[in-house]
Image (spheres, helix red, strand yellow):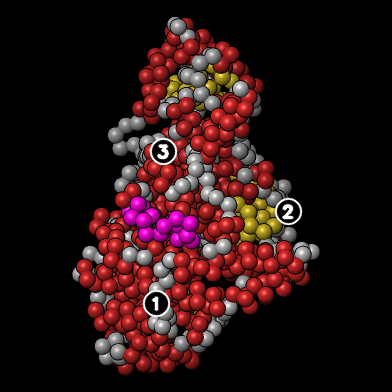
Amino acid sequence: MGQLKAFISYCHEDESKKDELVKFLHTLERAGVLTHWHDRKLLAGDKFDLEIKNNIENSDLVILLLSQDFLASYYCYEVELEAALRRVEAGRARVVSIVLDHCTWKDTPLKDFVVLPTDAVPLSDYVNSSKAWTKIIEDIKNICKDIKEKNELDSPESPFMIIEFKADFLNYLLSNELTLQHRQKENVDLDDIYIDPDLKLFHEEIDVVDRIVSSTKITHYSSCPDKVLIIGDEQSGKTSLAKKIIKNNFADGKMPVLIKGGEVNTTDISALIDNAKSRQYAAKNFEPEVLVIEDIELSRLNTKHLLVLIKNANARKEKIIFISGKNVQFNEAVWRELSDCTCYEILPFGHVLRGEIINKWNSLGQEMTIDASVLHAANDKVTHHVNALLRKNIVPPKPVFILMILQTLETSVPSDFSLTAYGHCYNALIQQSLRKSKIKNDLFDKYINYLTEFSYFLFKTNKPHVSDEDILLFTSEYSTRYLIESHEKAIDDLCSTGLLKKDYNGLSFSYKYIYYFYAAKYIAENYRVEPEIIDQLCAKLHSEKHANILIFVTYHTKDQDVIDKILHTASSIFSEESPATLTASDTEHFEELLETIPALVMESVTGQDVEEKRKESLTRKDIAARLVEDEQEIQEENDIIETHTFADINRSAKAVEIIGQILRNRHGSLRLDQLDSLSKTSFSAGLRFLSFYFKLTKSAKGEILDEVSKVIEKNSSLTESEVKDVARKIFHGICYGVSFAVIKKVSFSTGNDQLIPVFKKIAAEIDTPAVHLISICIELEFTKRVNKESIETALRKVGKQTIAYRLLQEVVMQHLYVHTIEYNDRQWLSSKLNIPMHNQRLAQSQKRTKLLEN
């Protein structure tokens, strides 16, 4: 056996200590005991992450130089250490930790491994460091001898020594389906951006509740069921998940084999396994323990022989993981044959997973150096874009779409990135679909026109999809106006791109954003001929379809008439109401709330606390989103009850969103007076609804309290006075909650860091507590700075012991919990807003205790 390979993992703050170690390792290298590698051996042109990961994967010994800087480093701890521990668990490597200085290594998994120097005395405690290094090298030499002796006892086919992936297959496992560019990293591989998706475990029984689990349960051998079927939509991440299953099982010491369904042309599972082994491994003299059969539905076998293949696979002793598109459910015979498998469905990314992928993207290439506050600000900025672009039920939140949006934002010029024209991102998604297909470039313009006309046909007929009879009507109308060789070819080609789909319902767009985008394109190009179309969209602003098409219209045209109609519509909603001011006259019917709610306390938070709070916030959004999804879906054309009240409430919210989109898309090209008018209209639309709500709850307070009391009485054993007290608290809490929600809604929909001066000017001009609160909320969220002057101005306006004052405290506190704020700023806010800091309160308590003891 030749030299062992050692990988040195260290934080760059400890580079001098790494150099000392290397100096002492030279004697072992000359003796042929081991060779070593560290990141300073990277050559020009090397792929940073790929080289590091390959060297860890090929190492026999991983030497960790421990310090607090190492433990705090994301890359050292989360990437290098995790990879090393996986190899240790698989029996492929040993870990040796060298404690450079006092640090919290005993609170990590490293407490269970060899730690040097002797008795884990930190190197910094030695007067003569050379003496410590000499002993460390002697210990490493003995560890190497032990490794070699154990390897010699192993069989020739020992996975520790021989079984490794072939280079081509390893590169495939690391590769992305998308070619991504990043300003900090020339080549982005799968590990750079991969996030484990959530899976839904579902049952045939109607009364069994679906359970959501992380796919990490499937990707590791110990927690994965013996027979698994994973289904997912197109572009849901099935291939990436298959790669992760292979890599994790290999790291766990289990030999996995990947079989691609499209290459399956025989029912002989043994032959398929042998063929896969020869293409994927440097040695094939071993029995696999995990079989992953990806895209089983793409097999070349007919149904009869596919059933035989599945039966043969299920009869083997290995764990079997079938991965398939959702259409497998419609092949009854195959679905029945797979019924013994534990079945999971890949879910789209919720807020938590979106947050994780955005965090990975923004820290890429600078994991060890990026400041937490800078990263949080970048994450929030990108999250605003991503969430606005995904929008519920329009662009599905699949990882491929999120990555394409991130890539589009990444490659935008700085002036656009501030708040990129969202239509540009949607257009990029569509163009990407066309480029990935085999359609010739000279057909792009024709097919875009086809999509535009077809979308307006759907809009005009008010149908989500069209039957064969409708298709004949559309193609006939189209042929009278445009030259086209073959409608059948055009439809087939557009279905192959994934832009259109044809199923038992008929022909439709694959995703709503494509339909809305092209319907808006048609309307923007033709509304001068049919001006009533814009009026129709504005009149039905409460409808998701009409509201979203109108948003896209503002991208396709810059015509002031369109903006004027939107402003007129927004101004007409609750036009009989004056905007809420949040002065005492507005909130007098729930001012009692201030006497019952506990005082706020500003907890001292660490960086870890901020991370946890941010994740908790995203988790709450996911729970809320799932509750909404579980409700019965209402037909799109009747997507809200069209009573005056309900329609106007929804119109008000949509108007704020649309105006916000216009401000974000066109803030650089609109005049100052237009920006002022749009911003005021957005503020006013939200606050007029709040005024309506206050009037309603104030006039009906007695009836509301009676109804709430009746509900409480049915479900509790409280006395009459206790019931009334609880009912009052619920009523006050709801009124307060709606007030807070409106402030946040207007702020987040309208906010833009480029328009802060406009918003501050409006706050000074209108000068009500409500508008000052909106302005403060925008400034905190979109600049991440505590503007003391703005807060002092707002404080003078809201006064003390008012609902508006409590709302201001709440806005600031929510911001503090999810952002890293300088201690001096926290102290200033604590003093100005009369929110005691937790550590101050604790110190005062300890001081009182001492006085009592004395």
Reading the chain from its start, which is encountered first: label 1 or label 3? 1
Q: Which residue is mark 1?
A: 578
Please say whether residue 132 is one of the residues in the magenta stretch: no
**Image coords of residue 136 (percent x, y):** 51, 13
Q: Which residue is mark 3?
A: 823
Judge depth for marks 2 and 1 and give the one in front. Answer: 1
- Examine the residues drawn in magenta and state their main secondary structure: helix
Distance between the alpha carbons at the discs numbered 1 and 3:
41 Å
Residue 508 on image: x %, y %: 47, 79
Q: Secondary structure at mark 2?
A: loop
Say what secondary structure mark 1 lies in: loop
The type of residue carrying mark 1 is Ser
Q: Which label sits on residue 315?
A: 2
Q: Is residue 217 visible?
A: yes
C-beta proximity under 8 Å, tags 2 and 3: no
- The amino acid type found where label 3 is placed reads Tyr
The answer to whether the residues at label 1 and label 3 have Cβ atoms under 8 Å apart is no
Closer to us: 589 or 339? 589
Q: Which residues are magenta?
A: 790-808
Residue type, mark 2 in image: Ala
Give the Cα separation between the discs numbered 2 and 1. 73 Å
Nearer to the camera, 848 or 580: 848
Question: Residue placed at 79% from the left, 64% from the top?
Answer: 717
Reply above or below: 801 against 373: below
Q: CA distance from mark 2 to mark 3?
A: 63 Å
Q: Earlier in the sequence, mark 2 or mark 1?
A: 2
| Total numbered circles | 3
CA neighbours of label 2 inside 10 A, class few (<14), some (14 to 19), many (20+): few
What is the secondary structure assignment of the residue under circle 3? helix
Find residue 464 and report its horizontal and vertical position in percent.
49, 82
Residue visible at 54% across and 58% down in the picture: 594
Q: Residue at x 58, y 40 (%)?
A: 250
